[in-house]
Image: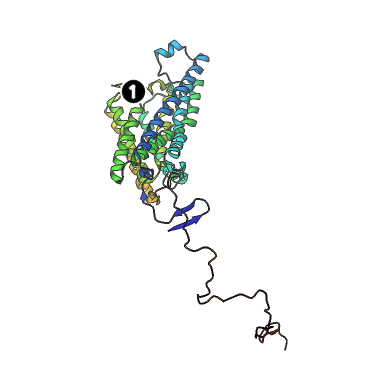
C-alpha cells in the first residue's frame, strides 16, 4: 500500500526495520560501499593533513620559529601553527564523513549524528553537567604536585591555549564522526545480525582509531583501543555521537591546557615504546566508565536509541497506484442508481413530455409568504 506525500513522492507505508545507530547504513548493505567509504575517508584525511601540516611548517619557517634543517631533525615539533593545522585536518572529517555517507549510501547527513537525524544539543548539555566536572577532578589529580613557577604565559603559550579552546572540540568531533560515525556504520552495514554488526564494527573502527595515533608503546596502543571501544558503546547505547564527542572533546581540551601551560606540547606526539606504563589503566578505566555512564544516563533521560532504518536516495521508489477504471468513472445505463439521461437545462421543458413543470414555490420554503 502506498501514500502520496508532497516532499518524498510515493512512499511505502509498510513499517521499516528498527535499527541502532551502528546499523543505520544497512539500507544499502553492498560491501563495496562501506569499503570505499573507509578508504576514501583515510585517503582524504592524509591528503588534507599533509597539505595543512606543510602550510603550518612553512608558516613557522617564514616567521622564524625554526629552519627547515631544525624541523627535519625534529618533525614532531608542535607549534601553534602545526597544532592548528592538525586540528583543522581532523575537524574536517566531520563534514567529509557526512558527505561520503550521502554520496555512497544516499542517506542524509543528519543521520550520521543520531538516529533522530540531528545532533541532540540538549542531551549533550545535560550529560556535560556530569562529565566535565569529573574530568576536571581527574586532570587536577593528574597534575598535583606541579610547581606553579613552572607554568609559562608566553605569546606562544597563549596562542596555543586559544587554538586548543577553539579548535580541539572540532578535532574531537571530527575523529568521532569518522571513527564511530562513518567507519562504524559502514562496517555495520555488512552484517544483518545486530550483535555481529556491532562487535565487528567496534573492533575494526577501534583498530583503525588505534593505528591512526601512530603509537608503538603497548600501553598507549591498549589505551587508544579501549578508548575506541568505550566510545562505540556510548554511541550505540545513546543512539548517536553526542556522548562520544563530548567525552572526547572534554578529555582532549582539559589535558591539553596544562600541557600547554607547562610547555610540554612537544611530548604530545612522543608515543614510542617505553613512554607509558601500567598507570595507563587509570585513564582506560575512566574513559570506559564515562562511556557506560552515558548509556545509563541516556536511559534515565528517555533518550531515543533506535529508529526505523533511514531511507536512501538510491532506493527504488514504489510507483503510484494504477486505477483499473478511468477517472471520472463512466456512467452505466444498466447500473442502478444512475439516471438514464440528464436534462439539458433547468427547469426542463414540459412541452411534449407529459410532465408538469415544478411549481414556482414549494410548501414549507423559508421564503414563502402565507
Classed neighbour count for the residue bearing mark 1: other residues with Cα under 10 Å, few (<14), some (14–19), many (≥20): some
Q: Is residue 93 above or below residue 125?
A: above
Q: Nearer the viewer, residue 3 or 316?
A: 316
161 with respect to 209 (left or right): right
Residue 350's x, y, as percent?
A: 68, 83
| Closer to us: 141 or 244 | 244
Q: Is residue 43 in sight in this rendering? A: yes
Residue 224, above or below 267: below
> Of all residues shown, which one is farthest toward the bottom?
370
The spot of residue 281 in percent (x, y) is 28, 32
Residue 365 figure quarter = bottom right
Q: Residue placed farthest to the front in the image?
A: 352
Q: Nearer the viewer, residue 364 or 246?
A: 364
- Find disc 1 in the rendering and name its residue: 271
Q: In this picture, is 111 found above or below 76?
A: below
Which quarter of the rendering shows the N terminus? bottom left
Across and down, in percent, residue 338 comes to: 54, 75
Amino acid at each position: 500500500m502506498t501514500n502520496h506525500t508532497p516532499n518524498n513522492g510515493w512512499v511505502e507505508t509498510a513499517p521499516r526495520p528498527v535499527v541502532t545507530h551502528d546499523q543505520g547504513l544497512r539500507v544499502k548493505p553492498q560491501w563495496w560501499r562501506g569499503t570505499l567509504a573507509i578508504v576514501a575517508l583515510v585517503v582524504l584525511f592524509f591528503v588534507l593533513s599533509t597539505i595543512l601540516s606543510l602550510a603550518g611548517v612553512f608558516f613557522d619557517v617564514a616567521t622564524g620559529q625554526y629552519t627547515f634543517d631544525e624541523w627535519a631533525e625534529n618533525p614532531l615539533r608542535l607549534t601553534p601553527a602545526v597544532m592548528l593545522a592538525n586540528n583543522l585536518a581532523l575537524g574536517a572529517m566531520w563534514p567529509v564523513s557526512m558527505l561520503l555517507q550521502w554520496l555512497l549510501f544516499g542517506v542524509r547527513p543528519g543521520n550520521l549524528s543520531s538516529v533522530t537525524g540531528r545532533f541532540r544539543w540538549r542531551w549533550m548539555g545535560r550529560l556535560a553537567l556530569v562529565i566535565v566536572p569529573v574530568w576536571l577532578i581527574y586532570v587536577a589529580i593528574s597534575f598535583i604536585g606541579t610547581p606553579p613557577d613552572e607554568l609559562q604565559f608566553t605569546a606562544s603559550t597563549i596562542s596555543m591555549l586559544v587554538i586548543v579552546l577553539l579548535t580541539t572540540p572540532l578535532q574531537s568531533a571530527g575523529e568521532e564522526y569518522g571513527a564511530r560515525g562513518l567507519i562504524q556504520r559502514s562496517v555495520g552495514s555488512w552484517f544483518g545480525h545486530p550483535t555481529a554488526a556491532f562487535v565487528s564494527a567496534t573492533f575494526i573502527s577501534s583498530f583503525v582509531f588505534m593505528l591512526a595515533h601512530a603509537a608503538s608503546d603497548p600501553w598507549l596502543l591498549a589505551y587508544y583501543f579501549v578508548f575506541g571501544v568505550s566510545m562505540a558503546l556510548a554511541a550505540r547505547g545513546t543512539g548517536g555521537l553526542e556522548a562520544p564527542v563530548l567525552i572526547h572533546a572534554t578529555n582532549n581540551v582539559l589535558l591539553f591546557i596544562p600541557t600547554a601551560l607547562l610547555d610540554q606540547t612537544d611530548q604530545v606526539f612522543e608515543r614510542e615504546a617505553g613512554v607509558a606504563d601500567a598507570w595507563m589503566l587509570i585513564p582506560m578505566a575512566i574513559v570506559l566508565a564515562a562511556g557506560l555512564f552515558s548509556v545509563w544516563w541516556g536511559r534515565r533521560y528517555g533518550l531515543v536509541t533506535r529508529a526505523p532504518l533511514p531511507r536512501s536516495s538510491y532506493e527504488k521508489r514504489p510507483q503510484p497506484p494504477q486505477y483499473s477504471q478511468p477517472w471520472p468513472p463512466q456512467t452505466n445505463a444498466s447500473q442502478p442508481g444512475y439516471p438514464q439521461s440528464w436534462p439539458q437545462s433547468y427547469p426542463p421543458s414540459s412541452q411534449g413530455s407529459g410532465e408538469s413543470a415544478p411549481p414556482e414555490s414549494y410548501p414549507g420554503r423559508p421564503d414563502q409568504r402565507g
